[in-house]
Image (cartoon, rainbow, N blue to C red):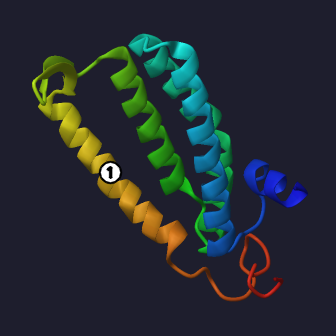
Amino acid sequence: MDGIVSLLTTTEGRISRKQWWIGLLVIVAIAIGLTIVLSIISFGNLLLLSWGGFIISLALLWPSYCIGIKRRHDRDNDGRDLVALIGASVVLNLLQVLGIGMTTGEVWGQPALVPDMWLMVLQFLVFVFAVYMLVQVGFLKGTEGPNQYGPDPLATA
């Protein structure tokens, strides 16, 4: 249990792709559990669901940052790109919750809030950047041997 806690709460050192995927699965499981609880207690109140979802995403930012920065360190990167992605994601989520850039439209014949074109373009750009980061942290091998952020996690495993 200490291993998972330190994985999700510390930013020092490096982790392997396997450790990153394990951390991601834990974060996703927590997010799903909290979302189910939120759905039950909100009684269909869309405003409560929107803000609750935003708060859940904020609560999971630190663990997401912790696993992401350690993977960027494993690739001998300072993680500024990760900070940019997290910042852009928070801004996009906040815009949606506040209804900025959203208009009322129809989705499958039902009234719904849909993003304006500028917001859709912004969402697409952040999505493309997120895919790039997923490849960087989830699929590409870290630097072999020690680097400025610590020893190779595969060598010490």
Query: Where does the image place residue 44, in percent across and percent down from the top left?
Result: 43, 15
Q: Nearer the viewer, residue 15 or 113?
A: 113
Could you tell me if residue 58 is visible in this image?
A: no
Q: Is residue 9 above or below residue 128?
A: above
Query: Where does the image place residue 119, in percent across and percent down from the top left?
Result: 22, 32
Q: In the displayed structure, does residue 121 sit left or right of residue 41?
A: left
Could you tell me if residue 96 is visible in this image?
A: yes
Q: Nearer the viewer, residue 101 or 146?
A: 101
Point out the image quarter for the N terminus: bottom right
Q: Nearer the viewer, residue 99 or 146?
A: 99
Q: Is residue 106 above or below residue 89?
A: above
For the point 67% across and 53% down, the residue is 26
Toward the right, the furthest residue is: 2
Amino acid type at mark 1:
Phe
For the point 77% across and 48% down, the residue is 9
Query: Where does the image place residue 51, in percent across and percent down from the top left?
Result: 49, 18
Point out the image quarter for the C terminus: bottom right
For the point 15% across and 27% down, the residue is 116
Q: Quadrant of residue 99?
A: top left
For disc 1, the neighbor class at 10 Å (few under 14, some 14 to 19, many from 20) is some
Residue bearing mark 1: 127
**Tag 1 secondary structure:** helix
Q: Nearer the viewer, residue 136 or 25?
A: 25
Query: Where does the image place residue 36, in percent across and percent down from the top left?
Result: 56, 31
Q: In the displayed structure, does residue 5 sit left or right of residue 131?
A: right
Q: Quadrant of residue 100?
A: top left
